[in-house]
Amino acid sequence: MTIDPVATKTEPRRVQLRVESVIEETSDSLTLVFSHLGPDGPTAFTYRPGQFVTLEIPHPQHISVARCYSLSSSPGIDDLPAISVKRTPYGHASNWLCDNAVVGLTMSALHPAGTFVPARWDRPLVLLAAGSGITPIMSILKAALVSHDQQVVLIYANRSPKSVMFADTLNDLVQRYPTRLTVSHWFESERGLPTFAGLRDAVPVDPGSDAYLCGPAGFMELAVDVLVAAGVERDAVHREVFTSIHTNPFLDASLQEPAETAANVGTPVSAEVEGTSYSFRCPPDTVLLDAMLQHGIDAPFVCREGTCGACAFTLAAGEVEMRGNDTLDDYELGKGMRLACQSVPVSASIEITID
Ligand SMILES: Cc1cc2nc3c(=O)[nH]c(=O)nc-3n(C[C@H](O)[C@H](O)[C@H](O)COP(=O)(O)OP(=O)(O)OC[C@H]3O[C@@H](n4cnc5c(N)ncnc54)[C@H](O)[C@@H]3O)c2cc1C
Ligand code: FES
């Protein structure tokens, strides 16, 4: 469909979540199980293993802040969606959630987003998590074991046995899938920080595996080195970066509204957004996300600062320049993935796809 800039859509996709239960995971982390409230009451919630939601958290000075939390539940396996939050020392949102989340609390959230989602399930999986980085890994792990049939290795680093989130669930899964799941714990209290030799020797890794990593930057860099040395293709290694976003999509939408420009000015863009085709022009010096929203296209986004990956698209033809990128790795860039909130077209025309 060719569209004119008649409708301006800068609102992100909001949902209302109600806390249905609060589960203590460790002394400094908990799981919040939600129901999704539609206009007529609780309704289905659609997401993919490894995705995250963005929550609006009250703040005394700024009204609210936005924070992303990976879904630790697995779609089609867990009845309700859940996130798991670990207190960050002196952090605002994580401590607010741990101190204030009670059954019945209703929260504004953005629709699930993110690209840390397995694209295929026909290879062995090796999962490496540290601390709260286990949350998207849990979602992927459960999906792999329950809905697919490959081997799964999990290497999980923590300060001590007391810091292990989902300890009971992991034990249950090892009992249920003794021939398919291997879990190897690394405790800093016993062995210090993870080392190359220690991770390499933790569990034999099938070189044909797909790998998913989540934890602090240093841990993930080490894990990539270990996996590549074990023969895993660099292209098959995927990472999720946890960080606090600085923008607030719940409050800032009107401030970020793009200026309207003439329909025939700018770079021609052909976009396939979740199955619907659009043709429009991206005005000069304008990022693609702003151009799509300006043209009324319901494109996904959360942070608009290159941090969360919610706006990722695949560049099928043409070239863009990104102003920043804190989330896509070299593999994803090599596959043509770019961030719509950071990309300005630099070729005569471009073609993009958002799944
Ligand atoms: C895709 C994604 C998924 C995520 N999933 C999870 C998850 O499943 N579970 C989870 O627990 N977290 C997750 N996170 C991280 C989460 O979004 C938050 O970043 C985390 O909870 C910390 O937020 P906070 O508000 O508590 O800390 P913040 O208030 O943002 O503080 C972060 C750090 O900065 C320091 N700090 C804050 N303000 C200042 C200042 N003015 N000067 C100096 N230092 C300062 C704080 O002391 C703290 O150490 C995820 C992040 C992303 C992007
Ligand atoms: S919206 Fe977060 S990276 Fe673009």
Image (cartoon, helix red, strand yellow):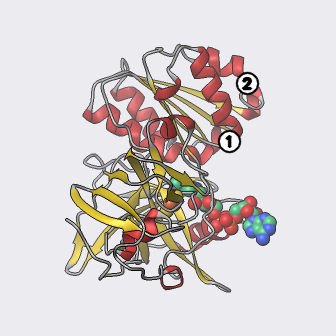
Residue flagged by tag 2: what amino acid is it?
Answer: Thr
Q: Quadrant of the N terminus?
A: bottom left
Q: Amino acid at mark 1?
A: Ala
Q: Nearer the viewer, residue 186 or 13?
A: 13
Using the image as rendered, state which of residue 273 and residue 283 is in the foreground. 283
Seen in the image, is 134 located left or right of residue 291? right
Which x, y percent locates residue 121? 31, 30
Number of marks in the rendered image: 2
Closest to the observer, 104 or 203: 203
Residue lying at the far right in this picture: please name it: 192
Of callouts 1 and 2, which one flags the residue occurring earlier in the amino acid sequence? 2
Residue in the picture at 75% in, 34% down: 189
Q: Considering only vertical position in the picture, is 242 above or below 155?
A: below
Q: Of tags 1 and 2, which is closer to the observer? A: 1
What residue is at 44 percent from the left and 63 percent from the top? 288
Q: Which residue is mark 2?
A: 195
In space, the residues marked 1 and 2 are separated at their CA atoms by: 14 Å
